[in-house]
Amino acid sequence: MVKVYIDGASIGNPGKVGIGYLIYRDANLLKKGSIYLGIQTNNFAEYMALVFSLIEILGMGEKKCKVFSDSKLLCEQINGNFRVKNKNIYPLFVLAKKIISKLDEFDIEHINREKNKEADKLSREAIGFLEI
């Protein structure tokens, strides 16, 4: 099973957005990604971080993963505890669930921002913004 840390960042909301993700097996980093996605909302960025990381996992031939995100909203929506009310986010929710259905095992867990610093750094690098 791989562990995936994801984050989406926006400078403004809406504003410039970027995503970051890291994929690990045990303590070994298998892959990381950082992508700028234009002008969007923070929630869009969070969902796209999930979608892009899941596509990477499937492309690597992985079928089991545990995702860690500091977005409580994303985690609760994917886990079915919160409804997706935003009409612009709903298609991304459907896409994420469709990709998740291709996996044999999937779990997503909300974590504190402090435990997600590397994914946050990658998402901010994607938009050219790092706090000094």
Image: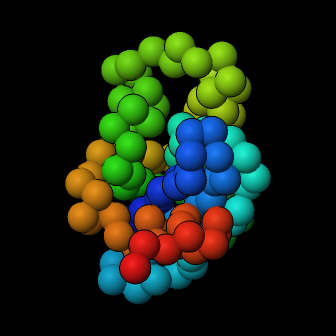
Quadrant into which the C terminus falls: bottom left
Question: According to the image, what is the colour scheme of the structure?
Answer: rainbow
Quadrant into which the N terminus falls: bottom left
Q: Nearer the viewer, residue 114 or 81?
A: 114
Q: Judge from the rendering whether residue 54 lies leftward or rightward of residue 38; answer left or right.
A: left
Image: 70 above or below 23: above
Asked whether residue 31 is in view, the answer is: yes
Q: Residue furthest right?
A: 38
- Residue 50: x percent and y percent? 56, 49
Q: Which residue is found at the position 29% from the left and 58% from the top?
A: 113
Q: Which residue is found at the position 71% from the left and 62% from the top?
A: 36
**Quadrant of residue 129 within the rendered picture:** bottom right
Q: Which residue is found at the position 23% from the left and 54% from the top?
A: 112
**Quadrant of residue 55 within the rendered picture:** bottom right
- Residue 80: x percent and y percent? 40, 22
Q: Nearer the viewer, residue 122 or 66?
A: 122
- Residue 17: x percent and y percent? 64, 53
Asked whether residue 94 is in view, the answer is: no
Image: 125 above or below 3: below
Image: 90 above or below 3: above
Q: Judge from the rendering whether residue 130 lies leftward or rightward of residue 128; answer left or right.
A: left
Please tell me how many numbered marks the rendered image carries.
0
Q: Judge from the rendering whether residue 117 lies leftward or rightward of residue 115; answer left or right.
A: right
- Residue 58: x percent and y percent? 65, 59
Q: Residue furthest bottom?
A: 28
